[in-house]
Amino acid sequence: MTEKTLVNPDDAGRFRTNDKVVVTDMVEGDIVFTPPSYKEIPEFIETLCDFFNNDSPNTFIHPIIKGIIVHFMLAYMHPFVDGNGRTARTLFYWYMLKENYKLTEYMSISRVIAKSKSSYEKAFRYTENDGNDMGYFVAYNLRVLETSFQKLREYIQRKQQEKKAASTFMMAGNINYRQAIVLQRLTNEPDTIFTVKDVQELFSVSSMTARKDLSDLVQQGYLEEIAINNVTRGYIMAPLKIPFA
């Protein structure tokens, strides 16, 4: 899970072998909580695996709540030397996909958590201070999921609008989808300047493809090429040829 992502490569996937670990507040540096003893890790891992791989015939736990519990338990135990947070979040994603919540794959949960780090840490603190009542952590993560879903919906709507608007430019002929998106964005934001690198990153294409897309639009009269500096060239909307404007 954490191979080639940690400061010390040897820490990837390795359980801690001491109790010299505390989780601190990223802002104030206060200790949020102290994980249980490393001696409990083997039994904990076995129990956790059993919990998320098997359903109790007597007790129903909604899959979303169960996934959040898995997230909490691994982050709370902090079994690994490093990478516990990202492993806990990834396990949540994995469990949601396992339970056929396929939309989760496209939801940026980690980004929302990163923007509300203080609330994330408080959820741990409140849980520990209230007899390990995970209601605080569950409530926080449900809000995160709601926010993530809303952002995904806004992204989909924005892309649908872009595609619809781009189709207008494509009707002019001799324009591919990438070029249509560039023209659509420049029409909506006339002060924008596109570069080859912008097109590369936007569409995940090579420098050669991006450069050809922009050069073709210049040749067709839709864009003008300008000098940003001695090396970089920029592209802006030409003043006249705007199809169906």
Image (cartoon, rainbow, N blue to C red):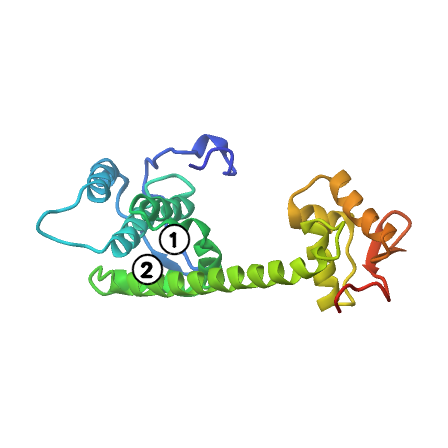
Three-letter code, disc 2: Phe
Q: Earlier in the sequence, mark 1 or mark 2?
A: 1
The residue drawn where x is 38% and y is 53% is 23
The reply to whether callout 1 and callout 2 are in contact (CB within 8 Å) is: yes
Single out the residue that lies furthest toward the left: 58
Q: How many numbered marks, from 0 up? A: 2
Three-letter code, disc 1: Val
User: Does the rendering let one see residue 233?
Assistant: yes
The numbered dot on residue 124 is 2
Residue 126: percent from the left, percent from the top? 29, 65
Q: Between 84 and 48, which is closer to the camera in this rendering?
A: 48
The residue drawn where x is 37% and y is 47% is 93
For this view, does 131 lie left or right of residue 89? left
Residue 219: percent from the left, percent from the top? 87, 50
How busy is the neighbourhood of tag 1: few (under 14 within 10 Å), some, or many (20 plus)?
Answer: some
Q: Secondary structure at mark 2?
A: helix
The residue drawn where x is 85% and y is 62% is 238
Q: Between 223 and 228, which is closer to the camera in this rendering?
A: 223
Q: Between 106 and 44, which is closer to the camera in this rendering?
A: 106
Task: Judge depth for marks 1 and 2 and give the one in front.
Answer: 2
Q: Quadrant of residue 148?
A: bottom left
Instruction: Provide the residue designation for mark 1.
Output: 23
Q: Is residue 206 above or below residue 76?
A: above
